[in-house]
Amino acid sequence: MVRFASLLKLAVFLTGTISVHPAAGKIWAQFCDDAACTENCGVSIDVNDPGCLRGEGGRQSLKFHGSDFLGTYLVHSPDNSCGCQQDCTEISRNAPPCIDISGRAASKSYRFQLTTCKELEGGPGVGNNCSPTNTVDSSR
């Protein structure tokens, strides 16, 4: 009986000190090489993580899975460090599990955010804030 009481106390102590987060409400995305989310889909990424996603340039689609999705925005950047925003894809809560991004601006990095990123949608976003590419005119 003493052993059971000790185990019960230990379980109560651990339950109070270890924070366990349920998986419900998590939405994951995978970048894929084709527009139909069937070819070479990468690792699953938590869309609630606002960090910069490098190395996904040239991808054609996003495949979603999870539960309780509330929507998000995918910010497209032309450099490898999410240094500016050249395009934005709104992904609504009723979006299909595969989003075609092949028609968007060519991007080398991405990030997810919960607030709108397009000026036209009336949000606090900045639209395209990337500097125009400097070109050298060799004819002069």
Image (cartoon, rainbow, N blue to C red):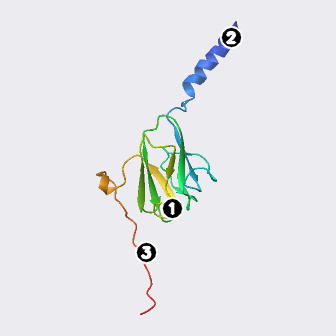
State the residue position of label 1. Answer: 81
Q: Is residue 135 left or right of residue 54?
A: left
Mark yes or no: residue 70 visible: yes
User: Which quadrant of the rendered structure holds the N terminus?
Assistant: top right
Which of the two labelled residues, at mark 2 and mark 3, occupies the earlier sequence position?
2
Residue at figure coordinates x 63%, y 53% from the top left: 39
User: Which quadrant of the rendered structure holds the C terminus?
Assistant: bottom left
- Nearer the camera: disc 1 or disc 2: 1
Callout 1–callout 3 Cβ contact below 8 Å: no
Name the amino acid type tagged 1: Ser
* x, y percent for residue 61: 53, 53
* x, y percent for residue 68: 47, 34
Where is 102 relative to 12, above or below?
Answer: below
- Nearer the camera: disc 1 or disc 3: 3
| Structural distance between the alpha carbons of marks 1 and 2 | 54 Å
Q: Is residue 63 left or right of residue 75?
A: right
State the residue position of label 2. Answer: 4
Name the amino acid type tagged 3: Thr
* x, y percent for residue 102: 50, 59
Name the disc covering residue 133, or none: 3
Mark 2, residues whose alpha carbon is within 10 Å: few (<14), some, or many (≥20)? few
Mark 1, residues whose alpha carbon is within 10 Å: few (<14), some, or many (≥20)? some
User: Relative to the observer, which residue lies in front, 37 or 46?
Assistant: 37
